Image: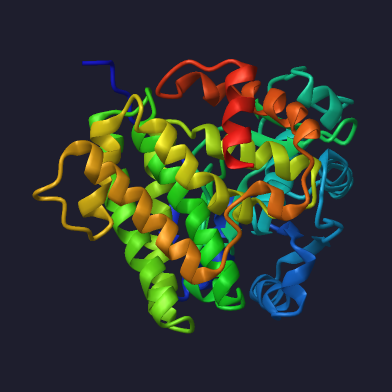
Amino acid sequence: MAEFHFSVRPKVWIGPDSLLRLPLLAAELAKTATTRALLVVDPLLYELKIVDRVKSLLEDRGIQVLVFDEIPDRATSRAADDALRLARGSRSPLVVGLGGMKTLMTARAAAWAAGLPMGSNLDMDAILDGKIGQSNTVPLIEIPTSLRHPFMTEDCVILTDSRDRRVRLVRLPNSAPMAVLVDPGLSAGLSPKLAASCLLDGLMGAIEAYVSARSSFMSDILLERAVSSLSLALDALIARPEDPQARVEAWRGSFLASLGLGMSAPGIGQALALAINARYPVPKSSLAAILLPYSMESAAKSRLEKIAALCPLLGQDASELSASDAAAKSVEWLRTRLGLLKIPSRLKDFDLSLDRLVETARDARELDFVNYLPRAVSVDDVFDFLKTAY
């Protein structure tokens, strides 16, 4: 049995109205008499009045709020640099991230770098290049809004490098948030199709972590329950697109997936989705939906028993099936739902050029978690996988 280590940093609240805990958490974590907070937000949330609601919660408790919302659709490390300058200039004792993964990672990078010693001139370029000092990280609260948060428990930052649009993952000690507030109501503004795509992104994280060489008995327990919850939520979203209970179930599964993933590792689909999204204007959730069935088929070559074990977790009867047939039925379950959702099934559907995707294969292979795939891969192997999905 491989050595097992368990620790989880962030305090997590998940459920309806968990957002209402924000003012108390802010005052507790900031530990100052005159509290200020830097709020890093996805600008799209203004339309849903979510930003105003979060600001009001803080300001009603006497907390001065500075808002950073200069995060474009294809945000790079430059946005994190801008957020860092505001965090340093304002000396805010607290950072709050509100939005999807890009926004949360921008807030996380700024909170970590703002805790570097006075006089430090490290910027995001230097940090992405591995020049990491000792940081007293500014306390960070993350409020995810996109039905998944795969790196919730990880001490890492994932950003698109502004210099070359390569995805970069940097392990930064103590960079994980102090607290996470998961309020399913904040995801109500997602369209049914986008919600389903985000859910599939979470499902990919759970399945790839389940078959990872780094998985353990503990991660398997969490990830099996995550797959079950996420598949139930997906079917509910397809049948009843406006059902709020489906999104509650999706968040339950996503939370379990993030815990399991923190004990295991993402896989080739996650790596490629991050790498392609960094270079091209294709949503990561759409890429995940395309890549997941191919990732499952690839994993079945070396982790057949685990892909087969997914079949009952997805609500399918596998009692009289061989392992290979059960694995095939798991993939068929997924492809059937992609068809119902009318989600593209090939990368070429997004007008991506195959010859230019060679760069993304290299970028994906350089992400450290790719070392934990069920079998070792080279850049050529990653590109061969890409060609299969193309």
In front of the other: 113 or 151: 151
Residue 314 seen in render? yes
Q: Residue at x 80, y 57 (%)?
A: 73
- x and y percent of residue 309 in the render? 22, 42
Q: How is the image coloured?
A: rainbow
Question: In the picture, residue 172 is in which quadrant?
Answer: top right
Q: Residue at x 55, y 61 (%)?
A: 197
Quarter the C terminus occupies: top right
- x and y percent of residue 190 in the render? 60, 73
Task: Tell whether 149 sits left or right of 298.
Answer: right
Q: Residue at x 87, y 49 (%)?
A: 86
Outermost residue toward the left? 320
Question: In the picture, residue 363 is in which quadrant?
Answer: top right
**Position above or below: 68 against 267:** below
Question: In the picture, residue 271 is in which quadrant?
Answer: top right
Quarter the N terminus occupies: top left
Q: Count the labels in the image.
A: 0
Q: Residue at x 79, y 52 (%)?
A: 281
